[in-house]
Image (cartoon, rainbow, N blue to C red):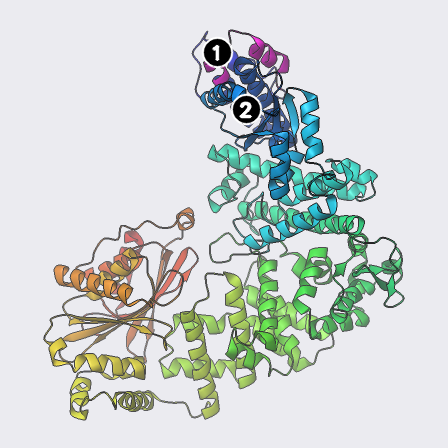
Amino acid sequence: MNQAEPGTPEKHAAQVLCSSGTAMDWPGIESLLGRPDTGLAELRQLLQSGRAALKQRFLTTIHTGDLVADFARLVDLVILAAWDRTALELDRVALIAVGGFGRGELHPYSDIDLLILLPENSRKKARDPVAAFLTLLWDIGLEVGHSTRTVSECRQQSESDITIATTLMESRLLRGPEKLYDQMRAATGPEHVWPSRVFFEAKLKEQHARHLRYNDTAYNLEPNVKGSPGGLRDIQMVLWVARRHFNTGHFGDLLEHGFLTGEQLRLLREGREFLWRIRFALHTLTGRREDRLLFDYQAKIAELFGYQDASYMLAVEQLMQRYYRTVMELSRLNEMLLQLFQEAILLNPDVDVVPINERFGSKNGFLQTTSEEVFERHPSALLELFLLLQQYPEIKGVSARTIALIRRSLRLIDDEFRQNPRNHQLFLQILRAPEGVTHGLRRMNLYGVLAKYIPAFGRIVGRMQYDLFHAYTIDAHTLFVVSNLRRFALTRFDQEFPKCSEIMQTLPVPEVAYIAGLFHDIAKGRGGDHSQLGAVDAESFCLEHGMSRYESRLVAWLVRHHLYLSLTAQKRDINDPEVIRQFAEDVGDQLHLDYLYVLTVADVRATNPNLWNSWKSQLFMELYLLARQALRRGLENPIDREELQEEHKINARKLLSGSGIEAAAIDAVWADMGSDYFLRCRAEEIAWHTRLLSDADLMDQHILVDIRDDAAAAGTGVFIYTPQKIHTFATATGIFDEMGLTIADARILSLENGYSISTFVILEQSGERIQEERGREKIRQRLVQAISSTGGSAMTVTRRAPRQVRIFSTQTLVSFSTNTTENHTVMELVASDRPGLLCDTGKLLQEHRVVIHAAKIATIGERAEDIFHITDSNRQPLDEESCEQLKKALTEGL
């Protein structure tokens, strides 16, 4: 806030704002605004001081609703003062607040929307005073949205746009003739435009479309407190419909109409107050209208609200868990109230109930209990309800009153309930149903049943992980995993992931995969290895539910090893037969491999929408096929390195058979290649490289660079052939980083002729291959230019890290081990991901005369977890002293 000088009118404007630390001095404010000598500077200062005073009160009060109302009142008075100074002569014109301002709810930087309502044929007379009024508001510092319309124009535009009709419905007369205002209200009311039935249907579609924009989940890790499911807009949606149909905009009136209970009214008000408090904090922190709860602000708001880090959960995670649980409750109330409105507005209340059994019936397509005592008399009906929804797909959902009854009956799900064999049978029937498994589990979670039936699941509801890797809360992620598994199991989705569908549909007990999906992350946040702890919970759950000991142990094994396939594919050299042999031995048999593969794909796809790409898909499939081959050969008869090299050569010759390259030319090229080359490169790559290296014209060049769209590798392949004295890794990775490309894999192979081959697999940031020839040629030219002009000296990457990445800080960790099979040192580097990280790493390795042979590049959200196979300049593993020196250099340099 700009400080006013002592004795100035601006200082007086600041002083009259508050008579105490908790309340606005409204008489003093009104007196100041009513004085004819109050100038522009005082009005501006009053507004600035008002925001500052509200901020101060915000830090000391818990009732944000009072602040929201007070700021709206302050803006009212300032706008009226401006109107009286510029447009008082327009006594037949109505000045009307609309939208949130019309409701009397303003956060510090909320939109301020005005309607200037004109009598017919008066636009010309009003033009200059209205322009002067809006100019004054702008000079004061109020940016308002405004429209100037007649009553007939209001009706016409409301008919064509429900958003305008909704805005006008939330209106409030500030100045001018009530008669004109009442005419506008009547003309845009349900008797003339958007009758309540049509209005309700349109608003339902609007809410559905809005939810889809946020992936139909309230659990995005950077939610919009206004627009996301369960947010402020969902609360407002209820009030819009109530205002249109019942002519009320207050929750208390819904209690009188019988649509809300006292407890539900309390939850709605508390939920709105909490979201208001977060939104107020966002506006206060940013100094602008901001409704996105970005990572940038989450930790600051957690500190502002008094949360503190604990051993079990960070302060920011505590704040966000409360947020997610609040919006889940608000989503439940939104669904229930809108369904009650649907029954009252759209459906026939006198239609007969279609009986299903003695506990349930269907009315207007919604499942409902036959009495209020059903759950008390038959607690198992709390699970039976979800099974019936699967068995009767024509039922659209659960009636609102039954949802409320479920919520009141959750206390019945106790230890005795969980140990009841009847309930075990019902739960397994829900998992085994041919349709509706995912919807059933999500509905169970929404109504709170799943958290009560599996208490360990209840502890992860709404729990976030404060990083960029996990895009959803743990419970939302878990249900996405089960959803992915279900899609694999249903033939109508075969085209999405054909191999996963083929495997999933042949599994003997599909629910083994579903339960593994439910439990794979259930122990997160407890301390210790969540895979081990979750495996114990999973096995106990399965045995209690009457599953066989073999099936129970299989589920536990899957939970314990759910990361194994992913980590092996992304961090180990799967071209090494020993890696494949060890992986196959640990998996044990084909059935375990099949279950693990589908669970891994479902898990990775559910972690983050941007995480899954064609490269990762190909990598996982390649490991699966190699492990399957090893299992079929028999673990006692593993493929050896020489056999694999020979297999690659034979297949490469087949691919070259129609190329016109003589066998002698192929042999001449291959003579310079070491055994590692034929082990690490696929036959398609060997054929590609051979075509290039056997071309005499190309070989006249000092540096050879080629790029191709490699569909088989699900990435774009880069080939660089240079003298060994030119260190290409740092230069190439710098170019890729500067161009915003993702590096998935890197290999550097030294040849017998003094040259080296560097190969990379690169992707667009979207995770897709670079399919345009023009784009690949641009990369090739940049590489040739950089390597030729610098002689391999690394460039400096200037591209900035994305906003989200800059929020997080990861400690740089370096560790070493020895791969005795390949006689390499394996270096694992963990650091904050940023543009230029690989380039800088390459520079440091080069300075320490370390030779890179291969690199596995993995970005886990904001963390880079990269594996380097390295040796010293004599092609020997690094000794202990060299490792320590390199570790120090990397830790300090990165």
Q: Residue at x 79, y 67 (%)?
A: 384
Query: Looking at the image, which residue sits at the far left?
Result: 700
Residue 130 percent coordinates (x, y): 52, 21
Residue type at numbered disc 2: Arg
Mark 1: secondary structure: loop
Q: Nearer the viewer, residue 474 or 788?
A: 788
* Residue 270: numbered disc: none
Q: Which numbered disc, 2 or 1, marks the residue that appears first in the sequence?
A: 1
Predominant SS along the magenta part: helix
| Membership of 171 in magenta stretch | no
Label 2 crowd bin: few (<14), some (14–19), many (20+), radius 10 Å: some
Seen in the picture, residue 237 relative to 528 is either above or below; the reply is: above
Left or right: where 455 falls relative to 360? left
Residue type pointed to by label 1: Gly
Residue 17's quadrant in the figure? top right
Q: Residue at x 63, y 69 (%)?
A: 536
Comparing 733 with 589, the one in front is 733
The residue segment tinted magenta is 24-44
Expressed as whole percent of the image width and height from the top left, the position of residue 579 reads 40, 80
> In the displayed structure, does residue 670 sit left or right of residue 611?
left
| Relative to 845, 273 lies left or right | right
Q: Determine if residue 522 is in view.
A: no
> Residue at horizontal 81%, vertical 71%?
422
Residue that carries the numbered disc 1 in the rendered image: 39
The percent coordinates of residue 137 (x first, y second) are 49, 22
Q: Is residue 102 above or below residue 541?
A: above
Q: Report the mark closest to the observer, 2 or 1.
A: 2
Magenta region includes residue 25: yes
Q: Place residue 217 in its image quadrant.
A: bottom right
Mark 2–mark 1 contact, CB under 8 Å? no
Q: Which residue corresponds to the image point at 70% horizontal and 60% vertical from the top-left? A: 443
Choose top left, top right, bottom left or bottom right for residue 874. bottom left
